[in-house]
Image: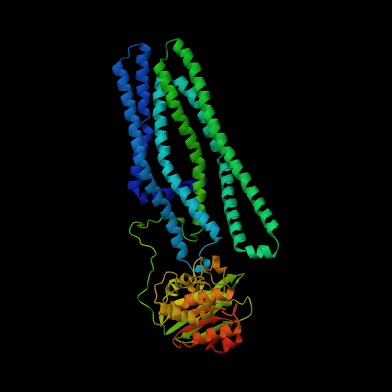
């Protein structure tokens, strides 16, 4: 099972490498040279100290040694500079391809079932998990390069003295085996850190969005105490993870000292018998530091790879039931030529003559559907009311009709032609949907209505009048330029609903679906709004409501 998971993870990583192969291999070549260049100073040290020991060194030898060392390290610095640039671009494309694919899949789904979990969890996963995957891919270059260096170093050292080499390498092998044995603990601990971090962030967001309810209930102390307890739990796992990392790092560094001691003790004996020269000793001590770096990095990478596996699993959950190959699907990301904001306009506006829903079923639970075999034919200009007791499925039915919830079965026809993609079809400029609890953005009234649209002031003024907002605009300090706050917290619930209505009306769609406009509005304001809406005989409305006065004005009534 573990091998299969590793193969899947490696397969996904390979697909991402193939996305921009020239960047990966350019990056690989640069850093391969960066990691291999330190092999050269080892030979230079050996030649220099061998001559120094034999007392045959000359001024020319010293100058040559300094120039060669300078050339090596200057070349390495230049490669690092170029590599940093290439590496940044490569990382950018990899992580943003993963983010783009996840967001593309989510936005292509019906809005109400786009993804599981909270927005906080989603944003945390898209940010951190994409970075984790990108880091793991670029880290493969370091691992391959340092492994090559370690192998070359081992061959050189074994040729000099195999006994010292084995004695020096043994502690690092022990650490490597130790890290491999502890990888399950590392995986579980870091997974818990991620879960608690995401949960804490979501809880903080919930509390801040409901701060008024918290104060009204007098629960400030309880909420603060709860946050402190969550933070303490998270801190415990974070500290464990940090202690483990520091322990491995300290162990590795101390092993360098232990290995150095072993080399010096054995070298002293061999040098006394003239079996080892000072140049050979310098090579051992020089390469030892690089070998220890590889051992440390390889051990960390084993743990990091497990974390990458978890990152792919978490992101795959957002694209289910589709394959996780969606995450690595190659897309064109042209950030240089893209202009923002981009408003996509559908020039081929559908002229509504009739809409027909045939045998719609959805909400399958406990061996039955919430709505089963629902059929309805709506003609242009008709007013359709959906009514029923609380929990009967009015909102769910309306969302299904608007393509915001997936249907389990059934077909939809417009003007006699079958609608293949209900979600895309039932959107502006054909249809708008006004939810029972509309959401406003942290912006002005104007921007909450337009959302980037460019319309004449007269058109904006007309929808404000039809939404019964004229008096409100006069009362607000800055009128249309009034800042509404987070989700419209600075204005009343009735104003929020009417601003959302104005947003729907300004799209000038053929079909408007409205879910319970009555909440938050007084009777006179609601009457004025419906009078304005129904004055347009060409507009088609489907409404979820229990208001008897509105139901009487409708052409068809659906009782659930």
Give the residue drawn at x 46%, y 80%: 463
Give the residue drawn at x 49%, y 55%: 126
Name the foreground residue: 154 vs 431.
431
Name the foreground residue: 140 vs 7.
140
Residue 290, percent from left and from top: 44, 30
Give the residue drawn at x 34%, y 56%: 336
Q: Quadrant of the C terminus?
A: bottom right
Residue 544, percent from left and from top: 56, 80
Task: Using the rendered view, name the quadrant where residue 516 is placed.
Answer: bottom right
Residue 532, percent from left and from top: 50, 86
Task: Using the rendered view, name the quadrant where residue 538 is placed.
Answer: bottom left
Side of 554 relative to 162 (left or right):
right
Give the residue drawn at x 47%, y 20%: 164
Q: Is residue 460 visible?
A: yes
Residue 57, compared with residue 134, is above or below; it is above
Residue sticking out furthest to the front: 477
């Amino acid at each position: 099972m573990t091998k299969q998971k590793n193969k899947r993870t490696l397969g996904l990583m390979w697909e991402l490498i193939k996305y921009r192969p020239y960047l990966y291999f350019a990056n690989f070549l640069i850093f391969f040279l960066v990691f291999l260049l330190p092999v050269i100073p080892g030979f230079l040290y050996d030649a220099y100290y061998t001559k120094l020991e034999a007392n045959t060194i000359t001024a020319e030898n010293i100058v040559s040694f300094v120039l060669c060392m300078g050339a090596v390290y200057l070349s390495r610095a230049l490669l690092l500079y170029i590599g940093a640039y290439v590496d940044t671009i490569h990382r950018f494309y990899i992580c943003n391809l993963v983010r783009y694919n996840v967001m593309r899949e989510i936005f292509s789904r019906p809005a109400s079932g786009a993804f599981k979990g909270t927005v906080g969890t989603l944003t945390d996963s898209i940010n951190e998990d994409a970075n984790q995957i990108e880091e793991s891919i670029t880290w493969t270059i370091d691992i391959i390069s340092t492994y090559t260096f370690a192998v070359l170093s081992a061959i050189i050292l074994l040729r000099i003295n195999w006994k010292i080499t084995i004695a020096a390498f043994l502690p690092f092998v022990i650490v490597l085996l130790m890290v491999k044995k502890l990888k399950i603990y590392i995986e579980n601990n870091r997974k818990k850190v991620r879960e608690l971090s995401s949960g804490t962030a979501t809880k903080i967001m919930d509390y801040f969005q409901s701060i008024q309810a918290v104060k009204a209930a007098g629960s400030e102390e309880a909420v603060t105490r709860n946050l402190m307890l969550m933070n303490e739990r998270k801190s415990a796992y974070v500290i464990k993870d940090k202690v483990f990392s520091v322990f491995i790092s300290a162990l590795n560094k101390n092993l360098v000292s232990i290995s150095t001691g072993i080399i010096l003790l054995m070298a002293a004996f061999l040098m006394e018998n003239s079996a080892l020269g000072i140049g050979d000793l310098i090579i051992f001590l020089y390469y030892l530091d690089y070998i220890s770096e590889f051992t440390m990095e390889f051990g960390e990478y084993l743990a990091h790879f497990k974390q990458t596996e978890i990152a792919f699993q978490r992101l795959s959950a957002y694209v289910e039931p589709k394959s996780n190959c969606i995450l690595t699907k190659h897309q064109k990301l042209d950030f240089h030529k893209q202009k923002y904001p981009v408003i996509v306009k559908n020039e081929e506006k559908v002229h509504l003559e009739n809409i027909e829903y045939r045998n719609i079923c959805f909400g399958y639970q406990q061996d039955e559907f919430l709505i089963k075999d629902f059929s309805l034919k709506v003609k242009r200009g008709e007013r359709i009311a959906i009514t029923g007791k609380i929990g009967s499925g009015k909102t769910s039915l309306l969302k299904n009709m608007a393509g915001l919830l997936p249907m389990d079965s059934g077909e939809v026809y417009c003007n006699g032609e079958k609608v293949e993609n209900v979600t895309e079809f039932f959107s502006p400029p054909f249809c708008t949907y006004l939810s029972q609890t509309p959401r406003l953005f942290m912006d002005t009234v104007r921007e909450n209505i337009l959302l980037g649209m460019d319309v004449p002031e007269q058109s904006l003024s007309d929808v404000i009048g039809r939404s019964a907002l004229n008096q409100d605009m006069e009362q607000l300090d800055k009128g249309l330029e009034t800042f509404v706050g987070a989700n419209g917290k600075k204005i009343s619930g009735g104003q929020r609903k009417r601003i959302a209505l104005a947003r729907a009306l300004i799209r000038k769609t053929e079909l408007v679906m409205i879910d319970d406009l009555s909440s938050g509005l007084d009777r006179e304001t609601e009457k004025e709004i419906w009078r304005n809406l129904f004055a347009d005989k060409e507009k088609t409305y489907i409404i979820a409501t229990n208001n008897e006065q509105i139901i009487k004005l409708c052409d068809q009534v659906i009782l659930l």
